[in-house]
Image: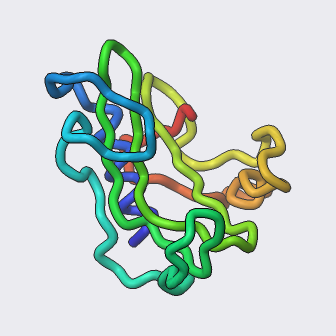
Amino acid sequence: MMMKTLVALSTALSTMAMTQAGTVIVDGTAEATYGTALAYQNTQTSFGNNADDGPAYANGSELDIARAVVEEGILYVHLAGSLESNWNKLDVFIDARNGGQERILGINPDVDYAALQRMGDDGSGNGLRFDEGFEADY
């Protein structure tokens, strides 16, 4: 379900044509300029809910809400949630132009201890596949 949510978010980002009136301020808060949520968590996380409300530590991982807006050709993304303080990561794929990878290839550069390569094709035709029509560029 999380992959479909991320793909839906990325698809929505790649098809945005207009922005809301206002100025985006990058400060960790999703102002009204970001508009309504493009994706939200509707499936319980298997990584546990974060019960620590301090800003420097999390004991659970979850993506609660994703918002985004394009303003003057710049994509602004606000992801609300937490990542457990144990090296858990969040990978965001963006389809912003023609072409890209519909299936993650095994020839991508090393990113975060080969996380991208582990999602990619090992030469047998496997590898993470996105929904039809989504080809990640970034």
From this view, report whether residue 100 is shown above or below residue 52: above
Residue most extreme to the left: 21
Q: Residue at x 39, y 84 (%)?
A: 44
Q: For the view shown, which residue lies furthest in the top direction?
A: 72
Question: Residue 87 appears at what percent x and percent y?
Answer: 74, 67
Rendered location of residue 125, percent (x, y): 68, 56
Residue 8, percent from left and from top: 32, 52
Can residue 38 be seen in the rendering of this structure?
yes
| Residue 85 falls left or right of residue 81 | right
| Residue 120 sits in quarter | bottom right
Of residue 7 and residue 82, the one placed in the foreground of this image is: 82
The answer to whether residue 63 is left or right of residue 107 is left
User: In this rendering, does residue 46 appear at all?
Assistant: no
Q: Nearer the viewer, residue 77 or 42?
A: 77
How many numbered marks, from 0 up?
A: 0
Q: Residue at x 56, y 83 (%)?
A: 47
Residue 88 is situated, as x and y percent measured from the top left of the image, at 68, 68
Residue at 45%, 64% in the rendered image: 81
